Amino acid sequence: MAKSKKIRLLEGLIIGIIFGFLLQKGGATRYNIIIAQLLLEDFTVLKIMLSAVVTGMVGIYFLKEINKVKLSPKEGSLVKSIVGGLIFGAGFALLGYCPGTAAGAVGQGNLDALIPGMIGLISGSAFFALLFPRLQGILETGKFTHLTFPERLSLNPWKIIITLFIVIIFFLIVIEYRGL
């Protein structure tokens, strides 16, 4: 039975609140922690993100195995990736927050994230939405398929997941051991 749109929106809101809470508790909503990460002086943000990658990777494929989710990757393009990366990077460099950490910083009362950050995020999104019909053809340049890495490599996904899990956990242990 399909869930109603309201239930899905409520679930998304609850997950978003939990995500924001965890970002805040981990320190990723603090400007000085993010800047220290960009200066390669404090790796708190990297540790949080890699932990999220490991958890998400294992969790999503586990849910797929027990038929609770269906993966539906979308096609992409080189130009979309470059343009998106440049917009994200410019916003990150100018503000010192990414969209998720900016929302979390607003939640903890940081005005620097609210005034320029959220206003920029919303106005930038609106501006892109207005331009999208004109840019759509250009953005499709360099298309790549919707295949996942396991599908592209014709491998059981768990071989890649377990390998990446071990590599990421080892990397996190090394970072922590070195006090970074």
Image (cartoon, grey):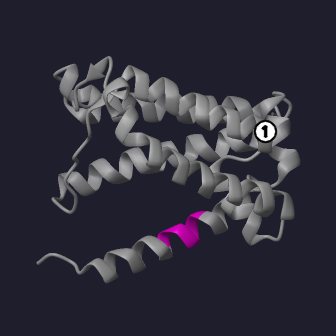
Where's residue 136, x and y in %?
34, 34
Q: Position of residue 19 (x, y in %)?
A: 57, 64
**Residue 116 on image: x %, y %:** 78, 55
Please identify the residue farthest to the left as the structure is shown. 1
Observer-nearest residue: 17 or 159?
A: 17
Q: Residue at x 16, y 22 (%)?
A: 154
61 sits to left or right of 80: left
* Residue 44: percent from left, percent from top: 75, 43
Q: Main secondary structure of the magenta part?
A: helix
Q: What segment is highlighted magenta in the picture?
A: 15-19
Where 147 sits versus 35, above or below? Answer: above
Q: Is residue 24 in the magenta section? A: no
Label 1 crowd bin: few (<14), some (14–19), many (20+), radius 10 Å: few
Q: Secondary structure at mark 1?
A: helix
Q: Is residue 107 left or right of residue 143?
A: right
As displayed, is residue 130 above or below residue 179? Answer: below
Taking the image as shown, residue 177 lies to the left or right of residue 172, namely right
* Camera-nearest residue between 132 and 40: 132
As displayed, is residue 113 above or below residue 1?
A: above
Residue 180 higher or lower than 9, as above or below? above
* Mark 1 residue type: Leu
The residue at which mark 1 appears reads as 94
Quadrant holding the N terminus: bottom left
As for residue 16 lying within the magenta part, the answer is yes
| Residue at x 55%, y 36% (from the top left corner) | 169
Quadrant for the C terminus in the image: top right
Quarter location, residue 109: bottom right
